[in-house]
Image (cartoon, grey):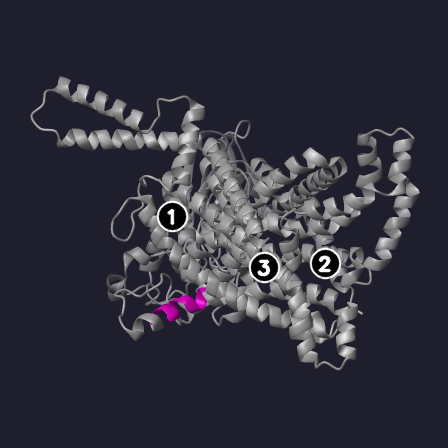
Amino acid sequence: MKLKDFGRALAEFWAEFRKSTSGLIGLGILVVSVLVVIFEPYALPWKETNTKWRSIDYWIDNSAGAPPAWSNLFTKLKSPETVILDAPKVETKELEGGTTEAIYTFTYKYKADKPPLDLIFHSTITGSVPVTISVMRPDGQAVDLASRFEEGLNAQNIRLSADNDGRDAAFGFMKNYASEEALQSMNSDSFRSTNILFNTATADMSTKYTPLKGDYKIIATAIVLDPTVSKVEKPYFVVTGSVSGILGTDDMKRDIFSGLVAGLKWALLIGILTSAFSVLVGVLYGIISAYYGGVVDSIMQFVYQIIVSLPVLPVLIVVSAIFKPSIWFMIAVMILFFWTGPVMTVRSMALQIKEETFIEAAKALGSNNRRIIWRHMLPILIPYSFASMALSVPGAIVYESTVSLLGLGDATIVTWGQILHDAMVGGAVLNGVYWWIIPPGLLIAIMGMTFAFLGFAMDKILHPKLQTR
Amino acid sequence: MYKWFAAKRIVKGVVIYAIIIFILSALFNTVSETTMRSQIEEQVRLETVRLKNVTPAAIVKFQAERKNSLIRQYKLDRPIVERIVFRTIDTLTFNFGKSTTIKSSLGDRSVNAIISEAIPRSLILFTVAAAFEIAIGVFLGLKMAQKPGKSLDKSGTLITMIVYGMPVWWLAMILIMVFVYGLKLFPSGSVHSVPTPTGIMYFIDMIWHITLPLFTLLILGFWGTAFITRNIVLGILQEDYIMAARARGIPEAKVLFGHTLRTAAPPLMTIAVLGLLGSIGGAIVFEGIFSWPGIGNLYWIAVQQNDVPVLMSSLAITIGLYQMGLILLDLVYGFLDPRIKVGGKA
């Protein structure tokens, strides 16, 4: 087949294909998904999701099990969203004896009705730098929250949390206002620094939360003892809110939206790789079986019979449970089962093509068998397998997620099935954590739908008998 | 001759099953033997504890002897090919041995007892679901094919495509979240309440437990059947004899259910049975989500507790059931399609 013929065939196909609305929708979703995969670094809110999905440290500043930010629209009391404050106003002062003092002032606009969960300071520090963090409230009160002095750091990250390191300071601040009996009646277990920091200063502030809305100045003061060797880099604050991101977080504090974006490429890869290879193998198998006939055909049909007598999913689960395979091995196992799909159709079509005159002509011209199969039979039959290729993609995606759901997935990557496994184990069904269960499964279903749209549209073109009158 | 055809098909099925079990035995040989060896160790340790008034030297001697005899009994000292053949024969004769952790409801650790307890529960759920699916699916498919391109056909096809890749276990998770823990309408799992009621309440209790799993299977199940029925029937409706029947003035219902459905019966049967067989695979996860204590749930527990004998035996049984389904399918097909019977002797 020449390139020009191929182009014309494609144009004809497209002319038919564009008549199908659902096919076009499928194509649209596929294009969007591919674009998301290509621009994944920009689409990921948490850039290192791919490598640090299972790292506890990476997600430590998030809140656990936080609903999505948009859930505020449906609640009366608004929750604060997790924000990162990383654009401070910097002031540097020369002190006596060659030390400098750097003051980083961050502004946090507090508008919600519930307090944030934590206020965390991060910075990369080299050398010996004492750091103090304090909060200037909208009512003019200042609270010196916490300080840390570690010597001889080598570009290490320090983390100061209001909830851990600032408990005493917050408690002291509360004592200035709260009445004696209110203090006695309070439960020290439920004490949280931010409940005080963002509370209106009243006598019953230990038990009652009245949000003090307005601009909070969060100040980090670093004294650089020896400016030649010590330095403070990248200071930022995380205000941990009780709602977070586009799709919330799971109970390990991971951002679910990031996980889903990172899982998209695996879903596409698993689906497309499995179906493309298995269809190619299946078509070749069918052609060879039909072309050679006789004993070869009998043996190949028997092997085919054995494979189709195996239920795929149970075997896949047992193989995964025992060999703990990587994703590539899993794809290989799936190809081992999936290639049977097009074999019978291709075989019956190849039996007809085999008898055509052009094959006879090719033989008379001295073409060998390989040339006939590859150059004359395969190009005719491949287009017919496109539909079955598209239609076997959802199966591969669902099988992989099913195996992952059982906790047998490849632990070095993030897939949608694994997120659902974590949701099952984490009791998301029991607790109604809808933002953890619905999105991953919905994406699996949408992927399936996309390829079904494509496959059915192609099927209709390739098998005109199904066309509605 | 139908008898010949049937006998040939059954023999072929058994041979294929034996080959599959042989391949699986070879594939999982190492892990099975590791489990067997550790089970032998455990047994010898138990027997040693029961010994009384013996010297340490005698204990060591007893352990070594006992271990050797058990290894010989389980044929672990033979060459590898022989071991695989023995393992295959064991599996084919349903001699599955003992589980490592899982117990049956009576506290039995024999794998046979565990599995035979689970199979009927799976069969109930999935045959009932399949019956409903086929009935609804075929009816809907006929209606869709009757007026192709009209609104019912279009919306039916659209829904089929939308639910095409939807994992049924995910829908199960959501429905459990809403109906069990949210609205508290249905129980969270199992076949019966504890304590199990008696008399008529026994069945009502069971229906109450089976409703949600059944409903979940049904929502997604019948669309595929309907769509394929539509395609098959659509092809038949374009045949000349249907037009001839209509021209003779035969009522439309009779054309549809008599002429069309009779011709469509063999391929429809195939789809129905293949759908049922396909759900055997999907059942594994589905039952786990609903804690429906069938064979699928057994996989789930066996994977969780790393119980290799139960896992292997469940797989052998599942493949066996699948194989039986395929044989049954061909037999019924041959029965429905006279051409197969005639061609059977060839």
The chain ID associated with circle 3 is: B
Majority SS type along the magenta span? helix
Identify residue type, mark 1: Ile
| Picture quadrant where residue A382 is located | top right
Q: Residue B193's x, y, as percent? A: 30, 66
Identify residue type, mark 3: Phe
Q: Which of the numbered marks, if any, corresponds to residue A456?
A: 2
Q: Is residue B26 left or right of residue A395?
A: left
Check disc 2 and report its element: helix, strand or loop.
Answer: helix
- Which mark is first along the chain, 1 or 3? 1
Q: Is residue B149 above or below residue A50?
A: below
Residue on which the image places disc 3: B335
Is B206 contained in the magenta span? Answer: yes
Residue on which the image places disc 1: B301
Q: Nearer the viewer, mark 3 or mark 2?
A: 3
Residue plotted at (74% across, 40% down)? A290
Q: Residue B6's x, y, as percent? A: 55, 51
Q: Is residue A114 visible?
A: no
The reply to whether callout 1 and callout 2 are in contact (CB within 8 Å) is no
